[in-house]
Image: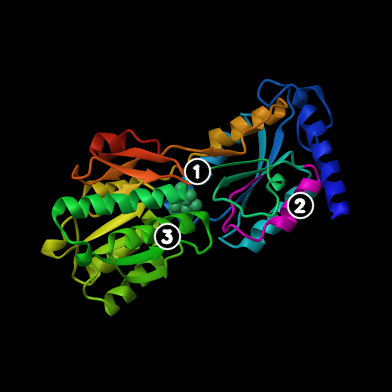
Amino acid sequence: MKKRFLSMLMASAMCLSLAACGGGANNDGGGSAASGSGTGGGDELITVGFSQVGAESDWRTANTESMKSTFSEENGYKLIFDDAQQKQENQITAIRNFIQQDVDYIMLAPVTETGWDTVLQEAYDAGIPVIIVDRMVDVSDEELYTSWIGTDALLEGRKAAEWLNAYATAKGWDASEINIAHIQGTMGSTAQIGRTQGLEEGIEKYGWNLLSQQCGEFTQAKGQEVMESMLKQYDNINVVYCENDNEAFGAIDAIEAAGKKVGTDIKNGEILVISFDTTNAGLTDVLEGKIVCNVECNPLHGPRAEELIKAMEAGEEVEKLTYVDEEIFAYDDTVKSVTATNSLDKEGEYAVTKLTQEILDGRAY
Ligand code: GZL
Ligand code: ZN
């Protein structure tokens, strides 16, 4: 324990000193880095290693695009990008490569929450600050990462469950008539943990029937496969809770291929599809009434991550956690707003936006 404490003390002292002289273990102490980020401060690029989950969904593509366009050469960065194809061992290998290359900063979008202590300790001991983006890591020592930027998946799940309760109540449907098929995201990811908890709390609170719960891995193909098997097992599904848009696209294809209808009214045999991510394709389905409610999860982490790096380059303290605000979109205005509690146990009122074409056209992703 003592050894580790000492090495951490050393590393943090190093971190502080590095931050003071411009971050990054490979900084040669040149004036340019110390005078803030690569933009404007001379010609030295800030090297950032980014370990991305994969390319499993439209949301992930938008997230990658945001990071790549922010950490560009003209903005003063050399970005080393790695796509892990949703495998943690690939992310661990990428982080070790970044350490070998002595990058100034490491950014990690972790596929799942656990299993990061060892490799983050290696980055810490090398004096390389780590920024976690999107999903959270569950580590024994919070000092192993400098900062996290992401979205509140538990709040997202709670928003969706409260929307379903308000919608069913407004329609006069009894909770016992609600028969849910639940297609989960990558098991053990923050998004899956939070969105699943939000739904399960709703089932507990309102008495809905959970018919089936299976993992759709956040992909369209798996979402379709899982929906097909659920439709073979149950003929009374009237709500499908998809933990991201790509699962919803697959589920909708499976439902229509089975000769059933997605829509807004269980009383005329339609199946309500609830989803997350509010991607352009997902919101297009909302406009068409194929997805009845879509809870936003904002993928545009690039600018926020850059703000953190600029602050660290300037030797400033940075927030440990930065949550981004997110909206709720629905096909109609049956539900005007919902009340839900976030991950920091703070209750809030969240407006529900009836989606229009111009709102969709005006969105950044
Ligand atoms: C959410 C993010 C999830 C998206 C999916 O924060 O981690 O991963 O909801 C993506 O589309 O696969
Ligand atoms: Zn999210």
* Residue 358 coordinates in the image, percent (x, y): 25, 34
Name the residue at 87% across, 52% down: 2
- Which residue was labeled with disc 1? 344
Residue 158: give its label: none
For disc 2, the neighbor class at 10 Å (few under 14, some 14 to 19, many from 20) is some
Q: Respond yes or no on whether mark 3 lies under 8 Å from ligand 1.
A: no
- Which residue was labeled with disc 2? 121
Secondary-structure class at tag 2: helix
* Identity, as a three-letter code, of the amino acid under mark 1: Leu
The part of the image, by quadrant, that contains residue 127 is top right
Q: Does the magenta-highlighted stretch encompass residue 119?
A: yes
- Which residue was labeled with disc 3? 196
* Residue 91 coordinates in the image, percent (x, y): 65, 57
Q: Which residues are magenta?
A: 107-127
Pick the front one: 329 or 257 = 329
Q: Respond yes or no on whether mark 2 lies under 8 Å from ligand 1.
A: no
Name the residue at 42% across, 66% down: 216
Q: Residue furthest bottom?
A: 233
Q: Is residue 28 left or right of residue 252?
A: right
Along the polypeptide, which appears first: circle 1 or circle 3?
3
